[in-house]
Amino acid sequence: MDTTPLDDLAARAHDTHVVVVGGGIAGLVAAFACAKVGIRVTVLEASGRLGGAIRTAEVGGMRADLGAEGYATRGGAVRALVEELGLIDAVVPTVPRAEWIAGLPGGSLPFPAATLRGIPENPWEQSVRRVIGWRGTWRAYVDRVRPPLTIGQERSLGKLVRTRMGELVLDRLVAPLSLGGFLIHPDDVDVEVAVPGLGAALTRTGSLAGAVSSLLDSARKNDNDSARKSDNDSARKSDTAAGDRLEGIDGGMSRIVDALHERLRTLGADVRVNSPVAAVEAGTGGRWMLRLDATGVLSSAPSTIAAAGTDDAADTAAAGTIDAADIVILATGAEAAYKLLHEVVPSLEPTPITDLEVVTLVVSSADLAAAPARTAAYPVTGTAVAASVTDSTARWPWMLPDADTRVLKVTFGGRGVGPATAALEDRAAAALALTEASALLDVPLAATQLRASRRDRWAQPPPISALGRRDAAAAARTAIHAVPGLAVVGAWVAGTGLAQVVPDALAEAERVRRLTLWAGADERA
């Protein structure tokens, strides 16, 4: 049992300087966790705003989330953060998912409910049969009579589905969801990461359909058990096997970023935007020097902090010299992290990045409002230019200003496929997005119905479910941890989605706090 006096611990914290490079959600969460115990924290964000993939802005008079719209409730870490930030009353659940598959021979159809990553529990069920047809249903039935695979024999989700249930299940169910929702082909998805326990269930039940049924039954049982709990037992309710319920924030997800920024200010942290770090270099005494520009000047001009999700100045950070850092937490994207660290961490490997473009459309259409609810539509491969279209107003009722207005987000690009809008001017990109949205939603949308549009570019790392990605991320973190005074957070090591990024950032911050408070400077590894 450590008996270090509290005054000594407080002094250690105050004498330690942690610099967080990157002001996205991972960096802000890590900075907040460090600042709470008295550590001196500086956050350096290269762009003119905080939040990273979380950005709320007005488009055509509508306040909309341009990046992340919500968070999965599994684990409860994001909900706990929201509660700590005083936003619990702003939490809103998404409406039940109403996903559709577009580009089928007979037109668009609702995505069958009883599936797991698109794999059907019962290929004979009518909603499944309508999508894959009688030929696909009979081929999927062969799964029941084929010998079971041993655990771990087939790691590729696409190859597993193709072998067990056939091409039609793969092409019309599994691939549209994987490419549209996760931007990765099923052939490149690791079964046991994407669907933990599927291999064991397959061996136990003797078929892929049986394995899916077994896992769904467990999820349903946990959901039912959770529903019986007290409404006040929110932490237990959110930690279910299903793990895919979504919640958002009334008014936009950037309220989380704004609240984190305000808490950091209250705790005395130095948060700076427009402060790109050009290099991270080893200094004297085991400390780190950060170059903010090509001239090597360790200072920054007064920087203006933009309110999250807007382009308006909110306040001004004080200028000054950035002291050498005892610990540097890299909270940038994968490309920037590699650029900054590859010399001090020679074994670090580059991470492949997918370039995406999301065109947000605000349309007024009585026909769209009257159509069957569709929170998202995913095309069969080769039938559309866009990867997906989501109706944010269908997912989040707080956004609706009137019955006919809809906010649609059309995503272009994918792994190995550049955005079709990349070379287009804004007006042409909006026109293409409107055409794709009309086709995927099966509702005619005319240019005269378009109230406003905007486009945003995103660089996205592979999901943690990509084959080899989990091992590569673990190897990167191990290599970075081997260098004293370095830590790393963010989607490229944690996995995409706030339900993975937030708890990972908290765990990495706890490691930094432990090293700061309980270890000497020579032990900070």
Image (cartoon, rainbow, N blue to C red):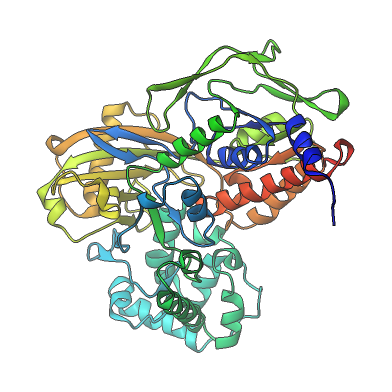
- In this rendering, the answer to whether 19 lies above or below 131 is above
Give percent across and percent down for residue 37.
67, 41
Q: Is residue 136 left or right of residue 262?
A: left
**Closer to the camera, 32 or 274?**
32
Q: Which residue ends up furthest to the left in the rendered image?
A: 366
Give percent across and percent down for residue 168.
39, 70
Number of on-image labels? 0
Give percent across and percent down for residue 470.
65, 55
Q: What residue is rendered at 25% in x and 54% in y? A: 394
Q: Quadrant of the N terminus?
A: bottom right
- In this rendering, the answer to whether 397 lies above or below 156 is above
**Closer to the camera, 64 or 366?**
64
- In this rendering, the answer to whether 99 lies above or below 408 is below
| Residue 153 quadrant | bottom right
- In this rendering, the answer to whether 345 lies above or below 378 is above
Give percent across and percent down for residue 272.
56, 23
**Closer to the camera, 324 or 479?**
324
Q: Is residue 45 left or right of residue 116?
A: right
**Closer to the camera, 240 or 333?**
240
| Residue 127 quadrant | bottom left
Q: Quadrant of the C terminus?
A: top right
Q: Is residue 256 visible?
A: yes
Q: What residue is rendered at 27% in x and 30% in y? A: 428
Q: Is residue 53 visible?
A: no
Q: What residue is rendered at 71% in x and 52% in y? A: 474
Q: What residue is rendered at 41% in x and 37% in y? A: 55
